Amino acid sequence: MTHAHHPDKPIVLQFTDVGFSYAQVPVLESASFHIHQGEFVALVGPNGAGKTTVLKLVLGLADPSEGRIQLFDAPPNSGRDRLGYVPQHADYDPTFPISVEEVVRMGRIKPWSRAYRARDMQAVADALRIMELTELAQRPYNALSGGQRRRVLVARALSTQPEMLVLDEPTSNMDAESERRLFDALGSLKGNTTILIVTHDTGFVSSLTDRVLCVGDVGPSGKGRTIVQHRIEPTTEAPAQLFGGEALKVLHDSAVDDPCCCTDGGRR
């Protein structure tokens, strides 16, 4: 497995000297990074470091107080319809009778159209197949295990046919089999779909990972946090069955410069 930058591909997400504060309390300071089309990137950091803030900024749910964010060469509010998001928690009524397929179909709901066309049906079928859920399509959602439900939420995001997939703590409360199936599916998407996984596991990442971005290092003024790219390497130290396969160790004592290597609309 090759783990490298893809400077020949367009930049799909770029933070440039981004700062953000909650009620005058600095959270992010001088945060800069970029992700190229087709990359598999892990954003890691301990709880409370600012990962949720980064997610809100990517999704356009918050605006930076300083700096600039571009998602598909546009502000996040304009570009997020090309992004699929899988939240860490999804509230639902366990008594509501809804099937796995109906949950995935929610991803095809458009506010400007109530029609459900053949291409929508195909997108749902493809998403179920990729996540190995076809045989569970008619199963009640509330009858699934926690890991299966997480895979259904990934399928719902995939049904939108996103150019970029963002997953928040995707393996939280997930059994080993569901974890293996999840990363098998992500491996099949890698290279075509840009993937960003957000996780509090700062020690190891999936072997699919091209680059690791770490939230938590103190910024230049010592008030907010910044984002640093760390090196990764193969390891035998990871717990068995982690990420459904081989893992990479994050070398927190080894930072990697992340210069803006691209110009002209995201190409070198």
Image (cartoon, rainbow, N blue to C red):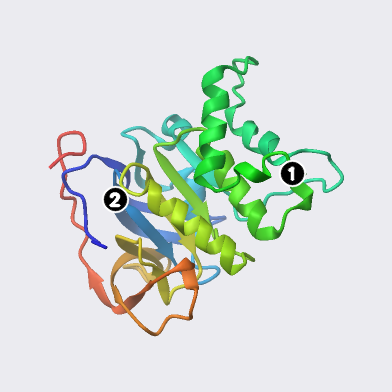
Q: Which residue is mark 2?
A: 34
Tell me the quadrant of the picture where the N terminus can be found. Answer: bottom left
Query: Which residue bears the numbered disc 1?
Result: 139
In this picture, is 115 found above or below 135?
Answer: above
Disc 2 is placed on an element classified as strand
Determine the image quadrant of residue 95: top right
Q: Is residue 21 visible?
A: no
Q: Residue at x 64, y 44 (%)?
A: 135
Q: Nearer the viewer, mark 2 or mark 1?
A: 1
- Image height check: is 207 above or below 5? below
Q: Residues within 10 Å of mark 1 (few under 14, many from 20)?
A: some
Q: How many numbered circles does the render carry?
A: 2
Question: Dot 2, crowdedness within 10 Å: few (<14), some or many (≥20)?
Answer: some
Image point (71%, 58%), residue name = 145
Q: Are marks 2 and 1 in contact (CB under 8 Å)?
A: no
Relative placement, left or right, of 221 versus 138 is left
Give the SS element for disc 1: loop
Q: Residue at x 23, y 61 (%)?
A: 2
